[in-house]
Amino acid sequence: MSLSEGTRERVDLVAMLNSGNLIKVCAPMVRFTKLPFRQLVLKYGTDIAVTPMIMSDSFVRSQKARDNEFTTSVLDTPLIAQFAANNAKDFADAAELVHQYVLPPIATATATITATITITTTILDPHKLTNFFLPVS
């Protein structure tokens, strides 16, 4: 993970969504919505950018995966990071690693519970995720 020098602008996502204004979101694309692309779409008027889906298990365990999968800059804002996980611990640990770089103080992530059920949640505290997951039958 890397962050260029400078101060990240604070964005109030709730206020943005409640403003009544049209909000342009750059949808995530596999291996395509990395930093250079996000900077380009933000330059041309996108309001919110989203990272590609990041696999939580490898992201948590490998510095090389973190360096490859998540880069940002002070101009890369507002930013939503999304993660795929098959357990709450990896999901929370990955969210904790990037929470300071994404829509402060909110970390947004996606957790895949099974091959057929995907849950998307906005979390305020990554440590509370273990209470979020329910057994899937």
Image (spheres, rainbow, N blue to C red):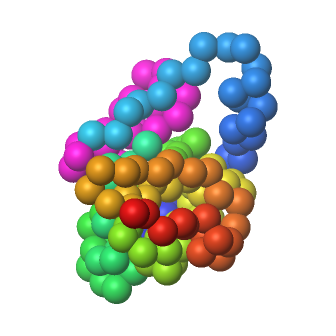
Q: Residue at x 65, y 58 (%)?
A: 123
The foreground one among 112 and 64 is: 112
Residue ranking furthest to the front: 137
The answer to whether residue 70 is above or below residue 82 is: below
Residue ranking furthest to the left: 31
The image quarter containing residue 92 is bottom right
Give, as a single range, the part of the protein colored magenta: 30-49
Residue 83 position in % (x across, y down)? 41, 60
Q: Residue at x 40, y 39 (%)?
A: 39
Q: Please identify the quadrant where the C terminus is shown.
A: bottom left
Q: Residue at x 61, y 51 (%)?
A: 122
Left or right placement of residue 30 versus residue 54 in this view = left
Residue 60 position in % (x across, y down)? 39, 80
Let me know if residue 40 is in the magenta part: yes
Residue 74 appears in the picture as rendered: no
The number of discs equals: 0
The foreground one among 96 and 68 is: 96
Q: Residue at x 41, y 31 (%)?
A: 26
The answer to whether residue 116 is above or below residue 137 is: above
The foreground one among 14 and 64 is: 14
Left or right placement of residue 112 versus residue 10 in this view = left
Let me know if residue 113 is in the magenta part: no
Residue 127 position in % (x across, y down)? 65, 76
Residue 21 position in % (x across, y down)? 68, 14
The answer to whether residue 13 is above or below residue 80 is: above
